[in-house]
Image: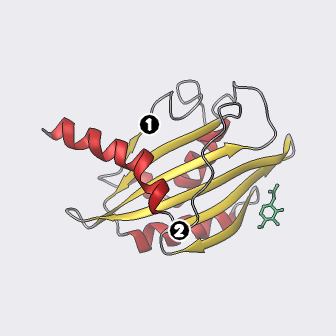
Amino acid sequence: MRTLLLASAFLAGLFGSLAAAPTPEPAPSPYRPFCRTLWLFVSPCVEVRTALVVQIQALSQYELVSVNPVHIAANHTSPERPLGEDISFSLSPTVLTNGCRVTATSNSIGFASLLDGGLNYCNLRNLLSATGLSSRPGFMEMTNEWACLGIGLATCKV
Ligand SMILES: *[C@@H]1O[C@H](CO)[C@@H](O)[C@H](O)[C@H]1NC(C)=O
């Protein structure tokens, strides 16, 4: 039963909040590397949103594009990849735990190699690590190689 609940939370997180987001991001192109991952926090969404926005503004490779109570859009660029990647977070409260469920995505722009070495995953994960939220009790991440390219090979810096 528990496994079933987790599995449906996983699927709902990966696919459900796309429709719920006020500015839905385009579906990831099959020819571009991307990562989609689901994070569960015990902390309320307002706290998670604030922490993510603070780090997007603090870290030099990230730029905030827009933010509202349920959605954050940003981008990530680096000297090696000036076109960068689009990043988005969709947040929804979890009723039973008073926590927050976040669907995080990173999509490469103009980068055709399907082997991104975990770049898109690390864009999301490095930001999360900077918030400190992932080391709190109750944090959970759900994704796989199909939804998040290169996750098995990724060695994120932070
Ligand atoms: C990143 O977002 C900022 C703010 O919206 C924008 O000015 C900039 O052009 C974007 N960079 C890329 C590479 O998309």
Which structural element holds mark 1? loop
Mark 2 residue crowding within 10 angstroms, few (<14) / some (14–19) / many (20+) = few
Using the image, determine if residue 8 lies above or below residue 18.
above
Residue at 16%, 40% in the rendered image? 2
**Residue 6 spot, x, y in % from top left:** 25, 42
Residue 44 makes an appearance in the image: yes
Mark 1 residue crowding within 10 angstroms, few (<14) / some (14–19) / many (20+) = some
Using the image, determine if residue 70 lies above or below residue 130.
below
Residue at 65%, 71% in the rendered image? 66
Residue named by callout 2: 22
Q: Mark 1 is on which residue type?
A: Thr
Mark 2 and mark 1: Cα distance apart in space: 23 Å
Residue at 51%, 72% in the rendered image? 50
Q: Is residue 115 left or right of residue 8?
A: right
Residue named by callout 1: 143
**Residue 120 spot, x, y in % from top left:** 64, 40
**Residue 21 spot, x, y in % from top left:** 50, 63
The image quadrant where one finds the N terminus is top left
Q: Mark 2 is on which residue type?
A: Pro
The image quadrant where one finds the C terminus is top right
